[in-house]
Structures are given as structure tokens and as C-alpha cells.
Image (cartoon, rainbow, N blue to C red):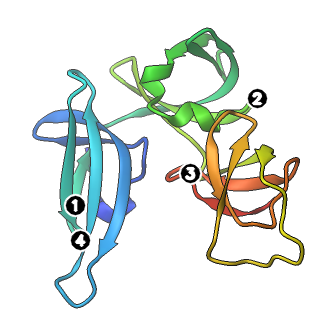
Amino acid sequence: MAKILATEIRAGNLIEWDKRLWRVLKQYHVHVGGRGGAYMQIEMKDIETGQKRNERLATDEKIERPYIDKRKMTYSYQDGSSYVFMDNETYEQLSLSAEFLEGQSGYLLPNMEVEVNFHNGRALGVQLPASVVLEVLETEPAIKNATATTTFKPARMETGITVQVPPFVNAGDKIRVNTDDGAYIERA
């Protein structure tokens, strides 16, 4: 097993905590100005029991990362409440439920390459790319001469998720979205 810094943990990673395997659902880097140092707030889910837990880790703390067999797979299609992936080497298909993906399904596009993590032959999690390009299906009309401001408006993406975007983004635009927190990055 390898150790990684708390600041290197990303959503979708698998870590060992209290001698059990956990999937990281969300991670936040928190810095309280003037009152102590920075820390990582991590929301994780036990692989076996489904129990969720929040932990606060020092930024220089090291966490055990179990040996994971990472396989490159391509997302093929959605079949009811399941998502079908194809192994890029063996061409075998793997079906994963929507609850298994824990909110990551909103970033999946057909033919997208992802990394599926296996531990002892069992699929444990999906590692998405850091960002994806999605098309805006529906949003309020753009404001004329709008530039980057601190105000945002909701926009519904082609995958069904809603992302807060700047006022100059229109329906039909393609934007880059962070897969860790669902934040708008830039126009694509």
C-alpha cells in the first residue's frame, strides 16, 4: 500500500481508514484565515456497509491508499438505471448501477474514457477526468455586454445536471465543468 498526502485526495479515490475501504465522495480544502492552519474536509462512504462519514485531515497528513487495479474503460450507454462500460483491452462489458456512481453519472458522455478501480476483482469506483465539456441545453438569455462577474445563473446541461454559469453563457454553448465539484471553469 502507498501513502498519499491529504491534499492529493480527489472525489472517486479509494482510501483505507480504520482498516476499511472507503470511496471519497467529496473533498474540500479549507483555510481559516488567521485561526489555525488549513485542513481537508473529506466526505467518504464505506464500500462494504454504505455508511457515510466526514473526516477532517491536516493538509500534511498521509493516508493509506490500497492497491487498486485501475482499468481504462469506455462508457458505452445507459441501460435503465445501470451504466454500461467496456474494457478497452478485453472488450468485456461491465454494468454499474446509478447508486454505485454516487452523482458521477451527470458527467458521463457516450464514448468517454474513464478509469474503473478494482480491488480483488471487484469494481469499487469510477475515476472521471478532472473536467468534461458539456453542452448547455437551457438557461436564461444572456445579458448584453456582460463580462465575467461574480453573479451566476443556473444552466441545465445535456446530461441533466445543473451548473451555475456566468451571465454571458447561452443555450447551445459548450462549457468545461469540473467533475470534482460541478463548477463552471470556462467556455470550450
Question: Which of the two marks, 3 or 2, is nearer to us in this view?
Answer: 3
**Crowding at label 1, few (<14), some or many (≥20) Cα neighbours within 10 Å?**
some
The answer to whether any part of residue 89 appears in the image is yes
For the residue pair 101 and 66, the one nearer the viewer reads as: 101
Question: Which of the two marks, 2 or 1, is nearer to us in this view?
Answer: 2
Q: Secondary structure at mark 2?
A: loop
Residue 62 — which label? 1
Residue in the picture at 19% in, 59% down? 56
Question: Which of the two marks, 3 or 4, is nearer to us in this view?
Answer: 3
The percent coordinates of residue 99 (x first, y second) are 43, 22
Disc 2 to disc 1, how far (Cα)? Answer: 35 Å
Residue holding disc 2: 111
- Marks 2,4: beta carbons within 8 A: no
Residue in the picture at 16% in, 33% down? 20
Q: Secondary structure at mark 4?
A: loop
Residue in the picture at 58% in, 58% down? 183
Above or below 1: residue 184: below
Q: Secondary structure at mark 1?
A: strand
